[in-house]
Image: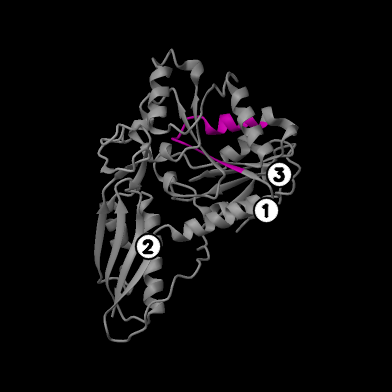
Amino acid sequence: MHELGIAESALRAVLEVARKGKAVQVRRVVVRIGARSGVEPEAFRFAFDALRVDTRAAGAAVDVECIPATGRCEECGACFAVSDFPAGGCPACGGARVDVAGGMELELKTVDLV
Amino acid sequence: MTSKPSTCGCGASEDAVIHVDVSDPAERPPLPPGDPLPGVEVRVDVNVRLLDANDRQAAANRAQFAARRICAVNLVSGPGAGKTTLLQRTLEALGPEIRCAVLVGDLQTDHDARRLQRPGVPVAQITTGSACHLDAAMVARGIAALPLEGVQLLLIENVGNLVCPASFDLGENRRVVLVSCAEGEDKPLKYPPLFTSAHAVIMNKIDVAEVLDFDRAVSREAIRRIAPQAPIFELSARTGAGLDAWCRYLRALVERGA
């Protein structure tokens, strides 16, 4: 349940933005969670909801953008969706060396304040 | 923080273990300011990693290790894979040749720190309470409590867990993942994030592989599939088989300055 620690970190960041922006309330929070980040979006949401009670973010809508895993071929540069781990090879040129291009994201993207 | 001074360590007395309390909230670095427009809805583009605070603390830890010429190794595995036994053998094998210090994380108890007591090796136990992993702030407190003068190799034993430690950079120079023959060959396939980030993988308990119907070749293949970048050390911390190659790896890290 490391989502709790990550949600704590996210809430701290959100409230810091709200404090700096002298906001009365946080309206909306957008976070990006990659499919390979090791964080389960539902577990994150559950933890975040439990933590934000009685804070300025209590009533905010929380949008979680789930970022699919993508790979980039080191040989030909092709980008493609990765379903299984690891990528197994480039579908364009058959190259074996594939980097993770997306899916590791774990970010607080935007915070809407009023 | 309650940190008792280390005794000489030769008697492994009650007070020889340094205790690190992680219950105080850590100091957090400030975030970029928002746009102060009272009454009007504004969107603040934050674009920070959710683990930004941890990442920054990890960078600070890494800088401190570099300044002190310490190589820090984060040892991660599921519970019972043999991290503590491996560290005991490693400390014995590296002996007086390399100056080591140990940080060990568990939810409760200082059993592991007591097992790791050696003359001249400072050990700090981090009891995380309920946290299922070490984070960079806990490690910062741990290293603040340890006498690090002259230390060349810091061995960090993470909380036994194959999932959560993957997300938390501690500022270590090397992340070493340990699997044991008692766990089945397919652990890397089931828990890829941790193995993806491993600099090296240890296959422990090879002395009982046969009894457990554990196929070392299948396990090697699974590790290579997920962690092609990682050298594999097959060893038994209990019998000492294969320990030499692991110790050579650590010596080389220390000599190279990580």
Instruction: Tell whether position B73 is magenta.
Output: yes
Q: Is A112 left or right of B30, judged from the image as shown?
A: left
- Give the camera-side residue of B191 and A98: A98
User: CB atoms at circles 2 and 1 under 8 Å apart?
Assistant: no
- Identify residue for label 2: A10
Q: Is B252 left or right of B24, judged from the image as shown?
A: right
Chain ID for label 1? B
Q: Residue at x 69, y 37 (%)?
A: B255
- Identify residue for label 3: B151
Q: CA distance from mark 1 to mark 3?
A: 12 Å
Q: Which residues are magenta?
A: B72-91
Identified by mark 1, the residue type is: Ala
- Indicate the secondary structure of the residue bearing disc 1: helix
- Indicate the secondary structure of the residue bearing disc 2: helix
**Residue B197, image x, y percentages:** 44, 41
Residue B223 location, quadrant: top left
